[in-house]
Amino acid sequence: MGAGKTTLIKSLCEQLGVVDMVTSPTFSIVNEYAGPEKIYHFDFYRLKTQAEALDLGYEEYFYSGAYCFIEWPAKIPDLLPDHYIRVDIQVLDDNARQIIIEKI
């Protein structure tokens, strides 16, 4: 928590032309943003089981062709697509982060 996940997603959305306010969907689980392309922003922190993502209809989002930014993907390890870009943010101290980007 507090590593900068939502801040990074806000910046990505801004670069992709989103004019909506980008906020963490902690309670709604998913936010949809309008721009030149549709973007879905997930926060799976509150999920207790992967079945909750199934109930949400995650497949319709993940396989829609839209950008899907996921906070807390470790909560749904068996549901992630075969190919994605993983961004790991590690807190080094209050003012420093290490970002590791990996194509899966």
Image: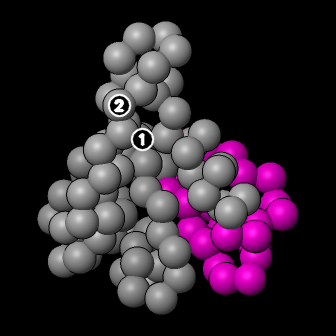
Mark 2 residue type: Gln
Task: Name the residue located 55 percent from the left edge and 45 percent from the top edge.
Answer: 8
Q: Position of residue 69 (x, y in %)?
A: 48, 61
Give the residue at mark 2: 98
Closer to the eye: label 1 or 2: 2
Q: Disc 2 on helix, strand or loop?
A: strand
The type of colouring in the image is one colour
Horizontal placement of 50 versus 33: left or right?
left
Horizontal placement of 48 versus 3: left or right?
left
Q: Position of residue 64 (x, y in %)?
A: 47, 88
Q: Quadrant of residue 81?
A: bottom left
- Please tell me which of labels 1 and 2 falls first in the chain: 1
Q: Nearer the viewer, residue 31 or 52?
A: 31
**87 w.r.t. 40: above or below:** above
Mark 1 residue type: Arg
Give the residue at mark 1: 46
Horizontal placement of 70 versus 29: left or right?
left
Q: Tell me the distance, in whole angstroms, between the alpha carbons under discs 1 and 2.
A: 25 Å
Q: Identify the magenta region.
A: 16-42
Q: Quadrant of residue 53?
A: bottom left
- Report crowding for label 2: few under 14, some 14 to 19, many 20 or more residues within 10 A (C-alpha): few
